[in-house]
Image: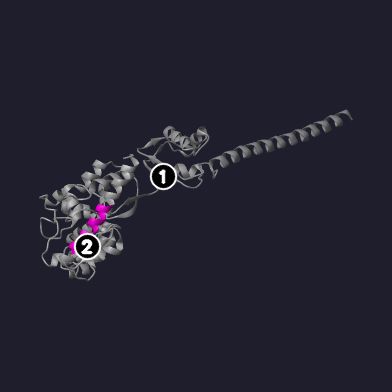
Amino acid sequence: MDNYSSVLNKKRYILFSGDEFIFGMLVLFATVFLIAESRWSRLYNSQAISSDKPVQIYLKESTQLDDLTQILMDSSLIKNEEEIKWAANIFGWKRFQQGHYLVDEPMDYDAFLSKLGRGIQDPVSVTILPGRTKADIVDKVANQLKFDSLAFQQAIQDSVFLAQHNLDQKDVIGRLFPNTYSVYWTTSPTSFFERILSEFNKSVVESYQEQIQDLDRSVDEIVTLASIIEWEARNNEEKRAISGLYWNRLNRGMRLQADPTVNFAIGERRRLLYEDYQVDHPYNTYQYRGLPPGPITNPDLASIRAAIYPEDHDFLYMVATPNGEHAFSKTFEEHKRKSAKWRKWLREQYRIKRMNERKQNGN
């Protein structure tokens, strides 16, 4: 009887010990699962990299994890620097490629680190405005891309590159086509210049080749006239009328007498003085007949179209009016009367201005 009880107790102990083992294993598996699930959720948390507003990251060179972490902390994209370092080590990312990266929606660690690690950039928008000087365009472009202004200046002056594209240095300003370009921040100066020339060729040369040939003028001549129209016209509505006037003068062998070319000759856009018109400069169309040697600025497509499609009229003269538009005349006598009218108006405005200044000064 005692032996039977002893065996029964042993069986119960074994059974009980087996239950404890199974329970322990369940606890272990549950713990491992919870830890794994916690790590998984942290690694693939869709809100791991996020901000209340879009954030642009610029890496000027290949960047190590510690430096990237500091950038992310400074940008408020992360709150826990140790966690992103842990995640980066898990995924094997230690260095990140130079470039521009936009965070405009939440991302998990895997997607974000992989994007920067592989250098999958977001493009930037570079805008070239019309009617600018070459120096202004160079500075504005360099401020929006990784290269500096000197590098871009050298690219657009590269004689070998220009020769390959059948371009002369004096014509470059006219080819810096106004547009908004979507490019990678790390693009090279030469690549960006090629992109601009490609856009010019597509928008102007390919689109209006037949019309330009019908005018019996070269692309450079069209762009040169368009550049004068660009500086002369205050609004697009007047551009074709101004173009027609200039073509009328050119076809009659008259001097263009375009004030913008004098502004270009003296290197300054301002109200011209009598002595400015006397400047001996090949771009001064008061002194030299025909078109100037090259464009004076970068015309937009509206100015180029105006040069290709001039308004048909008999006007030969124009004078700027107080509202920035122009009064057109067919004869010089008519032009003198209109000019005298506006000069009288200007003198009156100066007189009123001086009177107001004296009143303000108590005189």
**What residue is shown at x 33% (from left), y 53% (from top)?**
181
Check disc 1 and give the amino acid type.
Tyr
Q: Residue 14 appears at what percent x and percent y?
A: 77, 33
Label 1 packing within 10 angstroms: few (<14), some (14-19), many (20+): many
Which quadrant of the figure contains the N terminus? top right
Q: Is residue 246 left or right of residue 59?
A: left
Secondary element at image label 1: strand
> 237 or 120, which lies in front?
237
- Residue behind mark 1: 101
95 horizontally vs 196: left or right: right
Q: Label for residue 338? A: 2
Query: Which percent across, then down, holds residue 304?
Result: 25, 62
Where in the figure is residue 134, as x and y percent of width and height?
A: 23, 48
Q: Secondary structure at mark 2?
A: helix
Q: Residue at x 35, y 48 (%)?
A: 184
Q: Nearer the viewer, residue 336 or 275?
A: 336
Q: Is residue 46 above or below residue 167?
A: above
Answer with left or right where residue 52 lies relative to residue 117.
right
From which residue to which does the magenta span run?
Answer: 335-348
Check the image and name the residue furthest to the right.
1
Disc on the earlier residue, 1 or 2: 1
The quadrant of the picture occupied by the C terminus is top left
Residue 260 quadrant:
bottom left
Amino acid at pointer 2: Lys
